[in-house]
Image (cartoon, rainbow, N blue to C red):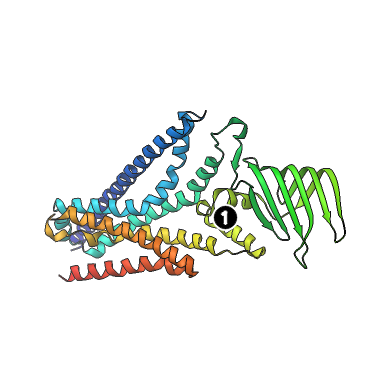
Amino acid sequence: MESVLGVGEICMRTLRKYIITDTLIGIASVLGLFVALFFIFDLVQAISDGGQSSAGVGVAAFQSALEIPSWIYELVPLSALTGSLIALARFSANSEYVVMRSSGMSLRNLALSLSVVALIVSCLTLMVGELMVPTAQKMLQTINVKSEADQQVIAQTFRSGHWIKDRDRIINITKLTKDFELSGILIFELNASDRAVKRIIKASSGSIKEERWNLRDVHVTEIYSDRLVRSERSTMNLNTLINFQILNSLLVGESNLTYFELESYIDHLEANGESVYRYKSVQWSKIGHLITVFLLVLIAPTFIGFEGRGRHVGFWVFIGTVSGVGLYFMSQLLKSIGTIGRWHPVTYTFVPILLILILAYWFVINREKR
């Protein structure tokens, strides 16, 4: 009896390893195909745009390559579902699933095997989203193909530059380099009582060291009720809460920040009495993204008619893929509606996930009963 149980356990381990390996290969293949297509399309567009400047093909290709982590992060959910469907459809078409079931494997055993796949893919997605995407986007910001003179400029959000609130100051920066050298600095300092402007500081350039700015070629205008007093200084030190992390948040954009960078920026905004709803929404979206990747792998068996010996397998793969796309658009729609209505981010993050999870669970239970 013990030898029979041992053989059965070895057989089950072999099946799990086979399912996990084939499913991971399917997901990687689909993801690689999607990313390759996006890379080719973006490279053609970048070369077309780069042909009007002195950048050349090399810079255009490098820019497109830096976008790859972002594409991977965005395409993983659809690739996870489609790759899992393709792997399971192959099992069904080749009658391999019939052999698996006759070996004692239930849908619960299949779900456990796919859970390992989902966990691996979710962990890789987390690494890409929290490590590779922010790094690649910051590198991408350092590239400016318009002119060599401005090659170090990484952002200029508006024609008037960046506007930042720092306690009782409103700061405008025209340009910012990758080494955090500032130029075109304009600072309005406000009274704490009536919020009227009490001092205007203009500086041609400056640099950042921790939470202190070193300004150069400074012009200061003191505003009193009956007069203006102007003065000039060669240098000036300014204590501020605006550090490297805050500026990174402004340059890269909230969607490309890590979870903890978002947390740091949210703390800064809350300290200045600013709205943090948009940034908290991005935080919850990151959590929902990982959960979606995990669940889309698990729900793949619901779309494959294993007992049909491969009949209409292609149809069910198509239905499953469309369902994944539908989940994505449903999430985006609810996010837009929720943002307008100022719903709590948890609401529009998890409602689509819970809906499709409940439907998938009901479908699997009914199929297993039959």
Q: Say how many tags the image has.
A: 1
**Left or right: 118 as drawn, with respect to 368:** right
Q: Label 1 amino acid?
A: Glu
Residue pictured at 48% horizontal, 46% vertical: 132
Q: Quadrant of residue 9?
A: bottom left
Picture layout, residue 235 above or below residue 166: above
Residue pictured at 77% horizontal, 67% vertical: 194
Q: Nearer the viewer, residue 29 or 324?
A: 324
Q: Quadrant location of the C terminus?
A: bottom left
Residue pictured at 72% horizontal, 49% vertical: 186
Q: Is residue 263 visible?
A: yes
Callout 1: 10 Å neighbours few (<14), some, many (20+)?
A: some
Residue 358 at x, y percent in the picture: 30, 70
Residue pictured at 34% horizontal, 61% vertical: 327
Q: Nearer the viewer, residue 347 or 125?
A: 347
Residue 254 at x, y percent in the picture: 53, 54
Q: Nearer the viewer, residue 8 or 36?
A: 36
Residue designated by label 1: 261
Q: Is residue 345 visible?
A: no
Residue 323 at x, y percent in the picture: 28, 59
Residue 83 at x, y percent in the picture: 28, 50
Picture layout, residue 368 above or below residue 34: below
**Left or right: 336 as drawn, with respect to 91:** right
Q: Which secondary structure lies at badge 1? A: helix
